[in-house]
Amino acid sequence: MEEIRAGQDIGRRDLFVNPTAAFRPSAYWFWHSIPTADVCHAQLGDFKQKGIGTILIQARLAMSRDDYLSPAYLDAYRIAAGIAATLGLKLGIYDDYNWISGHAGGRTVMDREDLRERHLFWSSSGDARGEISGIHPPFTHTMGADIVAWQYEGSVVEWCEWTVEAALLHPSVGIDSLDQVVDVTARTFIVESDGTSCTYAFDGAPGEGQMLTVFVSARSTTSQLINYLLPEAAERFIAVGLDPLIEALGDLVPDPVGFVFYDQPAAGFYKWSQISGDLGNSLLYAPTLPDAVSRGTGETFARALLALVRDVGSETLRLRARFYAVYSALMNEAFSGTLRRWAEGRGIVLTGHEILPHVSSWSLNGGFTSIDPRVALAVDFFGIDAYRHETAVDSNNFVAQLAPKLGDSVARSNGRSRCVVETYASAERTPVRAAGQWELTLETMRAQAIRLHCLGTRQFLWHGVYQTDGREDDPTPFANPRFDFAPGINFEPWWGYHDLFSQETSRISAFIEPATPHTPVAILYPLQTAFAEGPRHSHATHIGAWCEGLLASRCDFMFVSEADLAKARIEGARMLVCGLAFDAVILPSVTVLETGDTVRVLEAFRDAGGVVWSSGDRLSTVCDAADRINEVASTHIDRLPGGSDIDALLARFAPRGPDISGHSDDRPWQWVGYDADGWWRIVLFNDGRTPLESEISFGDGFDCEVWSATTGEVADAVILSHLAVMLEPQEVRCIRLRQTAQQGAGKGRLTIQPPLDNARAVVLVDGWSFAPGTDAPFVPISVETGWEMQGFAEFSGTGIYRLALEIGDETDWFLELPDVATVVAVSLDGFHIDRRGWRPYRFALGRLRPGVHSLELRVANTAANRYYTNTPYLGDSVDKSGLSAAPKLILLTH
């Protein structure tokens, strides 16, 4: 057994030293036109050199849709895949043009009008006659004219086949029960319509105190988005959008082309002049929907529809939850199910992500706040993931957020673990949309990638690398590649340092891979509450508060579904489910559950000594039970949970595993997990600007290994009683330890900072010269402020600093650069010393003899100052560039 474990350990170390493509960063490769074979060779070779492991070719808006999937496009695609194979790169099929999976650049609905999206709209009034008018997609309109033109033929939104699907008379105020509702569908007709509106009429008249609510369906004549409720739409999408790629690739499937990636399948989120009630956008409609809803709710389709937009008494929440469960299941099976069966038939993997309304936020609906996610594939994340072979999620900008944690949770629920995280940037420096962030630094991105790995990410997916850098003097978003979700990372001046980022972050991911995360807390994903209450209900913000509070206290967690709880085992005061062990379960403002089995499991866990807490609104409805619901939580908090609540929760169960303590409130990021053989794995990361210290203890003593993500080296195990870990700003540590019966040799200390004599540091202020690029002349410059303030405001690239450095005594020296924007390579006397892509910028110069030495610093900034000039994306000031604090020479003490 020890030999087997030793072999496994060696294999894990090998994977850590040389991570495979599964752990390396991947990237969308934006094609703005059909590339030549030379371009494919050059760029794919460059991507490989920079440490990218997987490429997904994505045709973008700048490419003519006539070129997309043309014979020339397919030829180039196969050439690129063949080159990728020779380089050892993996390739995935990004499944559409631009994004929004299913339309195949408009080909799916071409000559198939029946497959275009069809929606349900509604209107309520006290009149017998009414209209549906002013239909518009605000979500699309905010992205500009080019996006509207891409989604709608002629840039207009028009409709046909107006049909009354339901009409109901009901009290205008206070419907106490459905018995007060009269179905008058058969007496209500469309009397007039055109491409933008319709008028309907009821052949009677609402009585005093009554209101008429009419639901009308219409099919768009111009939208290129499909009806996701129709499996034939998915089949057509496959035939015109995916099969041509597979056939062109031939024997390059399934290696290196091993998967297909779908991106945000979603119909238009329409609003109109008469919209009212609980539901915030129109619903998709298909002929299969009424019968499915009637079977799933036990109510007529018309009365179930009314419950979506108005309170209809005590059955309201139950009807809404069941309606959306049926609606989501139909959509999942019609689209995702069809794609999965096709992928399996082709021998490839299905992955990708739906719309995530929580993107960039911890609140469940804190990202895309303008949409009602219930009308799209955007609520039942556990159910959607069951159709994937690998989990993928979306993330926006460079802050910790819910997406990777929820992605890891749904993966574990479906028998897998961790996820791919696509990361894109949106403008923050100005209110102008779609500029992206050319100001992004490698340090910022690295910090985000490490946070994402700690939150459940296996593979980081860049959005994206660019075939071209676009056009000068054209700020048009999307259509000009330059401002199509910048940055195109290979056009950033810091691109040459990307391999440092790739190697380190992929090793961190590989280090985490063999271990099970230590997650004492389970948060119940409130699916039925989300269905019934809608995105503005407090469950969304309570989820965010619990997540942020637990992470601030360095307590990890995972989401579980009701189906997970039904499979749980209770051992002692712990709940075992999805391969994880939980001490506590949280109900975040849960008002509706699907089944009484969930209640019984929670009660059994509570009665066994487990911790069950709830917050916000209390449970009121269980969809399969008519009886009154007893309180299942042992503790309830009426408000959003705060720090004291988190402390009280954590005090309810005993800590397990290594103890990691800090000396300040500002503690490093951490990930903690355990191997099957008793070893624990810890990742510590300081994403701040000041040094931090943590102390690790584990019983009376422990074996300790340090795995360097920078070099791949694994230090031999030592026995310790305590370990103090010093973390420089932006430093990350991977530590493996195991409790031992042997007495520890004492307290260990980890720090990369060498013993330096800062008191005798030499500040290098004067004598510097500078050239903005290799072909430019050198001029005197100050190193106490960036080059952007010294006549080079629009220069983006590699600036060269030189200094004739006079050394007096022979000794060992370190060079420290206090403030660099953003990456730097150091040479001395013509010999390369080292390079850094993030803090700390500290370099060992070695033992220097007395005399004059030539010091050269090559500093690369971001592309922002070049690309934003004369655009609305510049903002109030240019980006810092180069050195903005004087370098220091520091003696190494012995």
Image (cartoon, helix red, strand yellow):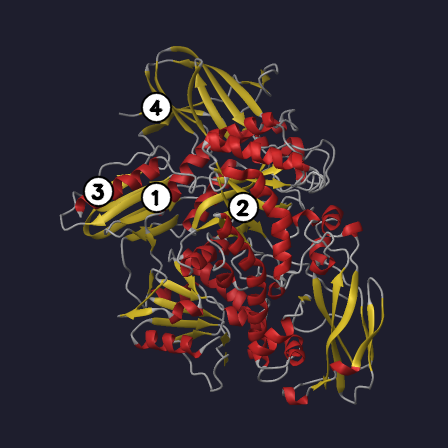
Q: Is residue 820 in view from this perspective?
A: no
**Which label is found at residue 6?**
3
Q: Nearer the viewer, residue 183 or 733?
A: 183
Q: CA distance from mark 2 to mark 3?
A: 37 Å
Residue at 52% across, 55% down: 340
Expressed as whole percent of the image width and height from the top left, the position of residue 5 reads 22, 46
Q: Answer left or right for 160 relative to 1.
A: right
Expressed as whole percent of the image width and height from the top left, the position of residue 548 reads 46, 58
Circle 4 or circle 3, nearest the eye: 3
Q: Nearer the viewer, residue 172 or 129?
A: 129
Amino acid type shown at disc 1: Phe
Q: In the rendered structure, are the residues bearing label 1 and label 2 in contact, judged by CB atoms less than 8 Å apart?
A: no
Q: In the rendered structure, are the residues bearing label 4 and label 1 in contact, judged by CB atoms less than 8 Å apart?
A: no
Within-10-Å neighbours for mark 4: few <14, some 14–19, many 20+: some
Q: CA distance from mark 2 to mark 4?
A: 42 Å
Q: CA distance from mark 4 to mark 3?
A: 43 Å
Q: CA distance from mark 1 to mark 2?
A: 22 Å
Q: Nearer the viewer, residue 795 or 85?
A: 85
Judged from the image, the secondary structure of the residue bearing numbered disc 2 is strand
Would you place residue 385 above or below residue 66 in this image?
Answer: below
Give the labeled residue for mark 4: 891
Amino acid type shown at disc 2: Thr
N-terminal-most mark, 2 or 3: 3
Residue at 47% across, 24% down: 825
Give the labeled residue for mark 1: 511
Q: Is residue 340 in view from this perspective?
A: yes
Q: Answer left or right for 221 relative to 592.
A: right
The quarter holding residue 771 reads top right
